[in-house]
Image (spheres, grey):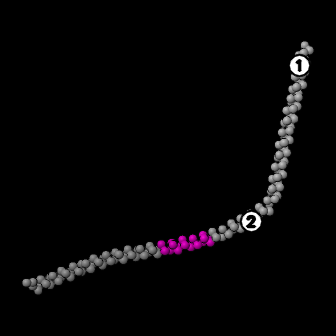
Amino acid sequence: MATRDDKIDYIQKKLDTAVDKMHDMNASLRTHMGNFETHTRQDEGMYEELKRMNNILSDNTASLKDHMYRTDLLEDYIKKVDIRFLPVERAHADKKAINTWIFTKLKFIAKLGAAAVGLGSLMVAVKFLIQFLLTL
């Protein structure tokens, strides 16, 4: 049978084992708590960065809305200017097209006249040449 000292030794070993496990758990808990605190600090930093980016996004959104409004105003202004200047531009383009057409036709007539004069001169020269050759 187990003696009283054996029982006390057994209980002492069990208590030592429990104390060792509690010590290991305490060390592990401290490590986890340190990791948790580091993670919490990182989360706080990330949250601050998120707030900063959100503010930037909000500012950019407001700027984009303002830009879109100004773009719409500019587009409306350009359409109004086009409507006002369209008849003037069309008249100018028509006048330019007519002047170009007239100039092109006059140039063609001048070339045709020059060709006719050249042909006539050639015929006169040939006629004189033939007469000169026949008189020889």
| C-alpha gap between disc 2 and disc 1 | 77 Å
Which residue is labeled 2 in the image? Answer: 77
Q: Is residue 55 magenta?
A: yes
Amino acid at dot 1: Ile
Amino acid at dot 2: Tyr
Q: Residue at x 74, y 63 (%)?
A: 78
Closer-to-camera residue (128/46): 128
Q: Which corner quadrant of the image does residue 12 belong to?
A: bottom left
Q: Which corner quadrant of the image does residue 18 belong to?
A: bottom left
User: Please, what secondary structure does the residue beneath circle 1 have?
Assistant: helix
* Residue 53 on image: x %, y %: 54, 71
Q: Is residue 42 magenta?
A: no
* Residue 132 on image: x %, y %: 90, 17
**Quarter of the image containing the N terminus?**
bottom left
**Quarter of the image containing the C terminus?**
top right
Q: Residues within 10 Å of mark 2 (few under 14, many from 20)?
A: few
* Residue 65 on image: x %, y %: 64, 70
Q: Residues within 10 Å of mark 1 (few under 14, many from 20)?
A: few
**Looking at this rendering, what residue extends furthest in the bottom direction?**
4
Q: Residue at x 84, y 51 (%)?
A: 95
Above or below 6: residue 112 = above
Q: Residue at x 88, y 16 (%)?
A: 133
Q: Left or right? Give the position of 131 relative to 35.
A: right
Q: Which residues are magenta?
A: 46-63
Closer-to-camera residue (134/14): 134
Q: Residue at x 74, y 65 (%)?
A: 77
Q: Left or right? Give the position of 47 relative to 104.
A: left
Which residue is labeled 1 in the image? Answer: 130
Closer-to-camera residue (88/56): 88
Give the number of the disc on residue 32: none
